[in-house]
Amino acid sequence: MQTNKHVAKSLERQQIRTIRRFYHAIAEINLALAKVHSTIGFTIDKEKYKYATAYVDQYVSYTSVWNIKFVYNLENPEVALLQLFHLQYILQREPAELYTSERNIIEEQWRLFNIQKPYKNDQIIARQEKMLAYIAAHENAVVEE
């Protein structure tokens, strides 16, 4: 009986460590992406990306994608995914020769994010398509007015 209790406690500790590592890794990704946001935020025209920002800000609690704070946001894999989408969307529309170090950071964060596997590939694609549809719908609504 004592052995089973010891094994159960050991497994529980191992699971807690694994969960902590996951959230720590997500927080590291979010912090790196937040740093990229703050770096490019001063040099781009944020108005061009207001719909992409508005979409992402729906999922960021108590702050903006341009200024990520709070542990809840930092440990949230959805915030990391949306930050990646947001930065990717912006940098695809900026000149290719600009922000080379930021592009490398984003590429590395994508790699680290995929190692964690918080979502399946089809979920990621569907989420990105949803964001792009939101942006297109809002841009079309402005054109029609």
Image (cartoon, rainbow, N blue to C red):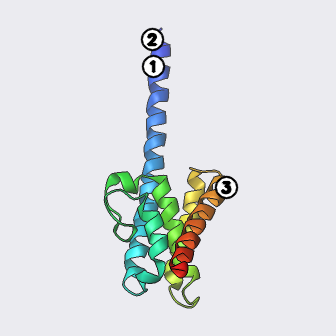
Q: Earlier in the sequence, mark 2 or mark 3?
A: 2
Residue labelled with disc 1: 6
Viewer-proximal residue among 14 and 132: 132
Mark yes or no: residue 103 visible.
Answer: no
The residue singled out by tag 2 in the image is 2
What residue is shown at x 50% (from left), y 73% (from top)?
87
Q: Looking at the picture, which amino acid does disc 2 mark?
A: Gln
Judging depth in this view, the residue of 26 and 123 nearest the camera is 123
Picture quarter containing residue 27? bottom left
C-alpha distance separating marks 2 and 1:
6 Å
Q: In terms of image quadrants, where is residue 110?
A: bottom right
Where residue 56 appears, as percent x and y from the top left, is 46, 64
Query: Is there CB contact under 8 Å for labels 2 and 1?
Result: yes
Q: Residue at x 45, y 11 (%)?
A: 2
Q: What percent of the width, then of the height, locates residue 102?
A: 49, 79
The residue indicated by pointer 3 is 121
Mark 1, secondary structure of its residue: helix
Residue type at the position of mark 1: His
Tell me if mark 1 has few (under 14), some (14-19) or many (20+) residues whose alpha carbon lies within 10 angstroms of its own. Answer: few
Residue 47 screen position, x and y as percent? 42, 82
Q: Amino acid at mark 3?
A: Asn
